[in-house]
Amino acid sequence: MSRPKTAIDWEKVNEYLKAQCSKTSIAEVLGINVETLYRRCKEEFNIGFDAYSQQKRSEGKEALRKLQYDTAFGKVNEKYIEKLKDTIYICEPNTTMMIWLGKQYLEQSDKVEAKNQNTNIEIDIKDKDEVSKRLKDVLLNELKENKDIA
């Protein structure tokens, strides 16, 4: 006689995937083997766990991007308010944490890249004096080049 199947809380799996957790850590939290997670995903959803997790991770990234946008404009999403009714939150959304998560998972950075057909500059926004100096140099060079052509 075979062992009874362990129940997998797919809502919990989805939340961990949206939070970018690894398959190994999810399996550990659920108290199951990673291979069980793979096999059961295929049985229950007819999709491999890699594809399933990619979809849920993307949903998590887009939710983060949306929350960053809403927070930037002081908007509160109606679905977020609805979730607040069922969930106890210990704090407001944290802008600093959203920035950090954006850098980790959304490839966001503090650097701006300005491109011109003759110039490619990478500017670190934190150093405003250096930005001003570099922009001034670029503009002067552009003026000199345009003057030579005319």
Image (cartoon, grey):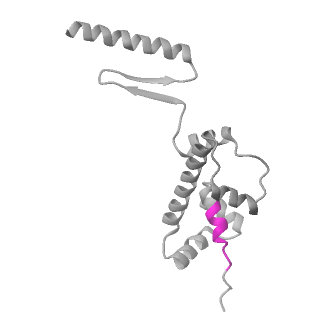
Instruction: Tell how many labels.
Output: 0
Magenta stretch? 6-15
Taking 72 as reference, is 133 left or right? left
Looking at this view, is 43 or 14 the one in front? 14
| Magenta stretch prevailing secondary structure | helix
In the image, residue 5 lies in the stretch drawn in magenta: no
Instruction: Kindly identify the residue that appears in the image at 49 percent across and 70 percent down.
Output: 48
Q: Position of residue 1 (x, y in %)?
A: 66, 92
Taking 132 as reference, is 7 left or right? right
Quarter of the picture containing the C terminus is: top left
Which quadrant of the figure has residue 38? Answer: bottom right
Instruction: Kindly identify the residue that appears in the image at 56 percent across and 18 percent down.
Output: 127
- The single residue placed furthest to the bottom in the displayed view is 1
- The single residue placed furthest to the left in the displayed view is 150
Instruction: Kindly identify the residue that appears in the image at 57 percent across and 44 percent down.
Output: 69
Q: Position of residue 82 (x, y in %)?
A: 69, 61
In the image, residue 7 lies in the stretch drawn in magenta: yes
Instruction: Kindly identify the residue that appears in the image at 63 percent across and 46 percent down.
Output: 75
Q: Position of residue 106 (x, y in %)?
A: 53, 45
Which quadrant of the figure has residue 145? Answer: top left
Q: Is residue 96 above or below residue 66?
A: above
